[in-house]
Image (cartoon, rainbow, N blue to C red):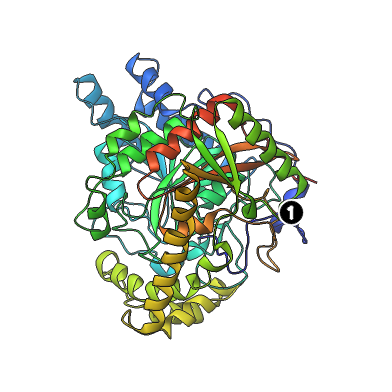
Amino acid sequence: MKRRFFLQAATANGSAAPAGGAGAAAPFADTGFAWLEAGAAELSRAMAEGRASAVALVQAYTGRIAAIDAAGPRLASVLEVNPDAAAIAAQLDAERAAGRLRGPLHGIPVVVKDNIATADRMATSAGSPALLGIVPPRDAAVVARLRAAGAVVLAKTNLSEWANFRGKNSVSGWSTRGGQTRNPYALDRSPSGSSSGTGSAVAASLAALGVGTETDGSITSPAGVAGLVGVKPTVGLVSRAGIVPIAFSQDTAGPMCRSVADAALLLAVLAGPDPGDPATRAQAGKLAPESLLRLPAGALRGARLGVAGNLVEGHGRGTVALFEAALAALQAAGATLVRAPLPNLDKMGAGELEVLLFEIRQAMAAYLADYAGAGPHRTLADLVAYNQAHPQTLALFGQEWFEQAVAKGPLDMPAYRRALATGRRLSRTHGIDAMLRQHRLDAIIAPTGGPAWLIDPVNGDAGSAPSATMPAAVAGYPHVTVPMGQVAGLPVGLSFFGGAWQDARLLALALHYEQTTRHRAPPTYRPTST
């Protein structure tokens, strides 16, 4: 989660030297990788034609991780490579040779964020040593769906520790276990968070596809600053079972990819009902996952898009210039633009922190019981005590949110019910839904955020530009970000968000914009952007 409470996305201006002296590094020459920027369709075609194999892809991406993540620019985006990846790939190759394909991702390497449980020889730690050595009894639901579709779970990625909801003044992309993830477009710039490692790894072609998680901005913000397509689905479209939680009213997993086509394909695999997550029952009759595989062409022609002016105010001139160029491109593609403020933007997030503090207390206890029962921790209070006993975990910032959450009561308390109901009413009925209905809109658009800010291990994340993540996050509605261009070589995203279960519609709009503009560009690994 990229916490709105002290970080409103980011500007390109920072205030402190980067951690680890990235500015002293030599530029990295990214040459010789056969699958640079390759998507799932290209890799599948290569395997079908015998030009590649799952084993060869695993070897290629594993070598690239060693060259770029552990050496070279040293992005620190990958925590560990799956020691069984080659064996899994060999089995998938044998199945292909026998004419059996598991699904659309057969043999495709995928990285997943390390707050998503894998019942294998990789750890599931949320970036904290508190969970190391505890093997989950089963895969998270999304991992099970990946394996069923034939994907090779190649590696676990670094993240902002505890998904950026442990304490104030945190440093996005930093965890006790993995250290500081870096932005591959400029190594002194933040990767944002909390899906920091997934964003940097996929941007750097360390894997074909990536899975992140979001409570508020944790997919869309790091995707925006890494030149990626990020999708925060409607809450309930993708199962959260087996994901280290923050809040069941807002949490979701989702794709982080280099193209809309890959993001739609990955979401189609991840989506679907799951008895382990009651929220997924709501998707019945609302959105068929297979519709994500049939996105209509030319979706912008005749579409009505709301330009949320109050989500543009406060951005730097570079971001505003990119956004105005995006508006021109949208109009040229056939969209009608309606400029109007998003109603109640200043009110809809007022109780968000209260909701998250109440929910994490119960949600964390449930996760620890179900997926970490072999370990010593049973409650959020146990994790607070662990951090107090292991001060290295608190070296850069504290655990104020954890401590405040421990002091909260049960979910039948009026303070919780009032905050949840008010946030939903203002973000849904009197917010996004009201704007869509009043102006007969297909979606609302705004800059996802500003360019990446400087990594600051002393003061934590900094920034004052607005962010488009909060409205859809509080509402539980879908949000897609797609590359909009670069400011001083730093990527900036364009957001499409809308009503519940409109995920496929948003992806179709984003696909047409992507195909019209082609703003995605590989990273440059500059030591500094200044």
The outermost residue toward the top is: 49
Q: In the visual, does 341 lie left or right of 163?
A: right
Q: Residue at x 22, y 26 (%)?
A: 95
Please say whether residue 520 is visible from this viewpoint.
no
Q: Residue furthest right?
A: 530
Place of residue 501 in the rendered image (x, y in percent of width and height, measured from the top left): 35, 47
- Residue beneath label 1, please? 21
* Mark 1 element type: helix
Q: Residue at x 32, y 32 (%)?
A: 89
Image position of 159 (left or right of 111): right
Which residue is the extreme one toward the front? 438
Q: Residue at x 55, y 68 (%)?
A: 347
Within 10 angstroms of label 1, few (less than 14), some, or many (20 or more) residues? few
Rendered location of residue 378, percent (x, y)? 31, 77
Q: Position of residue 16 (x, y in %)?
A: 77, 61
Q: Is residue 263 above or below residue 389?
A: above
Query: Mark 1 is on which residue type?
Result: Gly
Q: How many marks?
A: 1
Residue 524: horizontal and vertical position, in percent? 68, 35
Please state which of residues 336 and 147 is positioned toward the viewer in this rendering.
336
Quarter of image, res 375: bottom left
**Viewer can see residue 482:** yes
* Left or right of 450, for residue 306: left
Q: Which one is in front, 235 or 214?
A: 235
Between 266 and 457, the one lying in front of the other is 266
